[in-house]
Image (cartoon, rainbow, N blue to C red):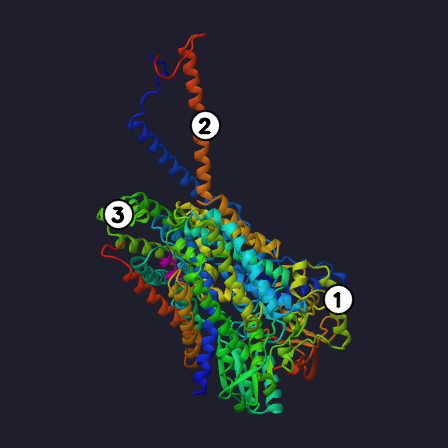
Amino acid sequence: MDAIWVAALNGLVVGASLALVAAGLALLFGVLDILNFAQGDFFMLGAYAVWLILGLGLNFWIGLAVGVVAVGVVGGLTLMLLLWPLRHRSHALMLLATLAISLILEQLATNVFGADSKPVAAPVSGRIPIGHTAYPVYYLLVVAAAAVILLGGYLFLRYAKYGIWLRAVAQNHRMAGLLGVPVVRVYALAFVAGSGLAAVAGSLLAPLTSVYPTLGLDINLDAFVVVIAGGLGNFRGAAVIALALGIVESLGSTWIQGEAVRILVFGLVIVLLIVRAQRGRGAVRV
Amino acid sequence: MLADHAPITAVEGAELQVNTDLAVAEINAAGGVNGRKLRVVYADPKAQADEAINLGQQLVQQHGADVLVGAVLSSECLGVENLAPRLKTVYLSSTGCAAEDFTSKQCNRYSFRISPVGRQGVLSVADYSVKTYGKRWAIIYPDYALGQSQLNAYKAGMQAAGGELTQIIPIPQNETNMTPYITKIKTGSVDGLVNAEVGADLTRASKAIEQFDINKKLPIVGVFGKERFGGVYPTSLDRDIGVSPELSDSDNRYEAAYHKAFRDQLAKEPASIVTTLGGTTKAVPGDLGYVGYSTIKALGTAMRQSKFTGRDDTDKLIAALRSLRIKQGPDSPGGDLIMNGSDHQGAQTSYIARINGQKEKVLRTIPAAQVPRIGSCQAK
Amino acid sequence: MGAGVAAERPARGRSDRERRSRNRRLLGGAAALAGLAALVVVPAAYGQFLPQRLSDYLIFSLPALAVGLIAGHARLINVGVGATFGFSAYTVAILTQHGVLNPFVLMAASIGAGIVVSGLFAVYAVVATGLEYLLLTLLTTSAFFSLPLLFKGFAGGENGLRVNGAVDVSFGLDPLTGNGFYWLLCGVTAFWCALSWYLLTSRMGRVMVAIGRNPERASAMGYSVRGYRVGVTLYSGAIAASAGWLYALAHAFVFEDLLGLPDSVNFVLYSLIGGVDYILGPLMGAAGLRYLGEYLGQHTAQSQFYVGIALLVVVYLLPAGVIGGVRRLWELMRRSRHEKADQVLRAGRRDRRLPAGRRVRFGRRR
């Protein structure tokens, strides 16, 4: 019984991590129709920010703040500068551009930081006994932090002026512009928020994942799966699916081999997509 | 030389390049091979097996390479191994290439591996671990070919020593969150833990093990080597036990000279390689680097013995490699080297050691002649 | 009465347009034949690894062509062509491991297996479009990548699988020496290019383009959108599967990366960079990008960085791909030549019509 509780808790940790990364991806897609292959690399840069700051002898939380500002603001605006000229072009070109950015960021990270994997100490030590397992408090903190950030994000989108504007632009940017919404500013906010969410996820999860240049690659596919399954552009859906996925993977791996769980998850998402595509179509299907 | 510089193989590729350059410089400084200088042509397969096969073919057929060396990932080196007899060119695997299949199942006349791999080290360390700590062991391992072969090796080793793997926990490759797997380890029911992870997975697993205090409750056996961590062991690996043909803080004079030469050579390499290895003050060759160095030195020795002057002398080179024996010395600073003529798998003096802070304390030395054979492949 | 310059240009009739179109087609056909002849003869005569290098480019250009046909004409981005390619290659390896060495049987089995896999993508083409289709193919390819790991005993796992049989499986042609295997590749590539050109220029191809541009309108006109999408997916699957078969013969070794996302994404890159709207585009993209990768791999440890830069250059400066960019440049040059010629013509006519000192007034009559 303890094993199941621990597995469920692990699932929450995994799901919370995924939810943070996927939320930024979902936001970018919802507002800008961009599937950002470089999202994982912003996650990686956020993790490096924490590692760098800790290396300077400063506090973990300062590292997290630096990560959000540096990666979120600078990275987000840089991404916007690079992708803005392509906004009327095909999806394929956008994907190609984000893929190119991902390749460049990975190589730059290798050149600057080295290719070895760097461990990051958790800011909070201490363990809580759960059955026979001494569960690290920091893992529970990650779940709590993710919940707060996602709830904050949800409330922002629902009630704050810029949040409402984000949703308006996502629905119909032309109409939103005609009604006085500063569309370009909102786009910039989407880029910054999307990158910032990835960076904060990277910073928070650095003590769990360690830091290395291809960290983003490993996290990208899972984040894509979550965003696809949650409904492209659906912030809340992504969070819910991330949690569900985390729990399924964690509990599933208790009884089934890891690769089989992965294929099972992919299969479920494929079926979900097909069903959703079928349901979303009218009588005239093309 | 197929030296991977993709981010996932950057450490191996960097060690391979530095140590190859060092070995070649030393061989050429001593007069070369039969009056001719060795020249290395590098190609980067970028951790892709089809690139490795393609580049291997190109190096031989277009650039006239006499011998192929390198390729880090198992799929790369197995692919190039398959290519070698088709090109009738000698191929030596070097840093990386951890698949036992290379010599235990898929051997051929042209392919050789100098350094011990898989069970050759694991059987000895398993024996030490069971006799020292107890019979029941848990294992976490990456759920792909390398991890599977490590699992089989530890199973065989534990059994041979009278022990048993009672908890077997596979972890998907590149799994970013190890928590669901680490929490399956029941510390009260085993005498020790085998951590068979590698690369970034090793760092993550070790970190998670530390966070759950498992390293304080159980002795841990696994891969070690400072070069994987920019020359500095993380605290999560403290007291880990592993096996290696080379120690980063050995007081043996040959190794001391080798380490100094390594750092001097590193200072001449491109900045990206220096950064990858942790900088000129912290970088160490470790077993990854030592394998690259000893492979080229062994090749140089075999070339001299066979009076190799070019590809027309390939058969003579093969004969020399098959009977290769090198005593500990400048050409093999870590210890002796013995090549097995039937499966073309080398054996080197190996050391079972424990990580103490930044030091590596030797627990047992296994002479090259006692390193076990891992297969019955006949390289014809 | 207002003065004006009466246009004296003779009326260009339909026959003139038809003649120009026929000339263009003849010229294009002659150029294609000349190109094929050069491709067959020159590398073989030159030797020095060139046929082997081009063999590699040709093998990888076929899946790129498959992607280009779906993406350029059906407007569906398929990131799953790698699964078809890899599955077909694995079929060859597994069959040879079980003693099947007949080259014709291997060819048929591997292409058949690849078509079965592309049947799955055909289902996706029916139920989804755009980004949803792309994501379905992405997930499927990721799942296929795990198959060799799941069935290690059968498929070799992460270590890969050897193709047995030496040259027996490749019709006695050694891929590493001589020109025979290279000519086989040229033949297969020429076959697929010619067949694709024929299909695309036929009514079927025009319908496919129409469906790609506006599926609702095409459906309203009575065309079966599903049928055409399934057809083009299976056809491109056959092309990718033949590439997988040839790959297994050429390298005598298969591994899980062939099934995975990186190779699939590479095929998409080749076709986008070359130009998805043209048959030769993916071929050029494959050759160009693979050559770039080889060159960088031998000269720098930063190849990933430079490939990223090259991709950005293509995205910003050559959005229609290399061939699209060249064609656009050609059109611009031709237009500018015609404009200059027209200006000269007009200026010449003005000079003829008006004696010196006479002025021309335009506009309303006073």
Image quadrant in which you'd find residue A168: bottom left
Closer-to-camera residue (A266/A241): A241
Q: Whole-percent x and y of residue C278?
A: 40, 45
Q: Amino acid at mark 2?
A: Arg
Q: Which residue is mark 1?
A: B261
Give the secondary structure at mark 2. Answer: helix
Region in magenta: C131-138
Residue at 45% over, 85% down: A3
- Quadrant (top left, top right, bottom left, bottom right) of the N terminus of chain C: top left
Percent across and percent down for residue A251 are 42, 79
Element class at badge 3: helix
Is residue A175 shown left or right of residue A109?
left
Which labelled disc corresponds to residue A253? none
Which is in the foreground here, disc 1 or disc 3? 3
Is residue B90 among what the camera can see? no
Which disc is residue C218 wearing?
3
Q: Camera-side residue: A280 or C278? A: A280
Identified by mark 3, the residue type is Ala
| Image x and y of residue C143, in percent | 40, 67
Magenta residue check for C136: yes
**Is residue A25 depicted above or below B287 in this figure?**
above
Of mark 2 and mark 3, the one earlier in the sequence is: 3
Whole-angstrom CA distance, mark 2 to mark 1, is 66 Å
Query: Which chain letter goes with mark 3?
Result: C
The residue lying toward the viewer, choosing from C17 and A257, is A257
Report the amino acid beneath label 1: Ala
How far apart are the two marked residues, 1 and 3, measured between alpha carbons? 72 Å
Question: Does A80 appear above or below A200?
Answer: above
The label on residue C337 is 2
